[in-house]
Image (cartoon, rainbow, N blue to C red):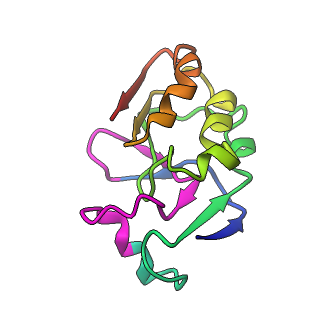
Amino acid sequence: MKVIKARARRAFSPTKIPGARWVINQYIGCQHACKYCYAKFMCKWYDYGKWGSWVIVKENIPDLVKSKYVAGKVYMSSVSDPYQPIEEKFELTKKILENMNKGIKVSILTKSDLVLRDVELFKRFRNIEVGL
């Protein structure tokens, strides 16, 4: 598993995902490597190998969400699972949720039971949805 550490310029990126206005991608690439995943297209832009063999870790994103407010729903994440195994080490999703304005609407989709770690953080948000 190749880990590529990077710095993001911004945390919130506009998206055309139905029902969301913004996306946060703290990771690019996904260890789950699901056969059906639409995000495999990322391999066209990143020459690190086969989908699932690498993850880009944007270490500074938790700091970029501090004191920021965006209107509209924020989807986490469009090119990875925010609770993939590498999250146990880097805890970017957890730190983002700790630092994010609690008035922001958040939507999280994961296939990992690691999401249970952050249940108490979810309770701080006025509007959050988590799908498994």
Which span is picked out in magenta? 16-41
**Quadrant (top left, top right, bottom left, bottom right) of the N terminus:** bottom right
Q: Residue at x 50, y 73 (%)?
A: 53
Magenta stretch, main secondary structure, is loop
The part of the image, by quadrant, that contains residue 103 is top right
Which residue is nearer to you in this view: 58 or 71?
58
Does the magenta-highlighted stretch encompass residue 34? yes
Report the number of numbered marks.
0
Q: Residue at x 38, y 29 (%)?
A: 130
Which residue is nearer to you in this view: 23 or 88?
88
Residue 64 falls left or right of residue 11: right
Residue 100, position in %: x, y?
63, 31
Which residue is nearer to you in this view: 21 or 102?
102
Residue 69 falls left or right of residue 33: right
Picture layout, residue 56 above or below residue 110: below
Residue 56, position in %: x, y?
60, 66
Residue 73, position in %: x, y?
41, 34
Q: Residue at x 71, y 45 (%)?
A: 64
Does the magenta-highlighted stretch encompass residue 4? no
**Quadrant (top left, top right, bottom left, bottom right) of the C terminus:** top left
Picture layout, residue 123 above or below residue 115: above
Q: Residue at x 72, y 62 (%)?
A: 7
Residue 78, position in %: x, y?
41, 53
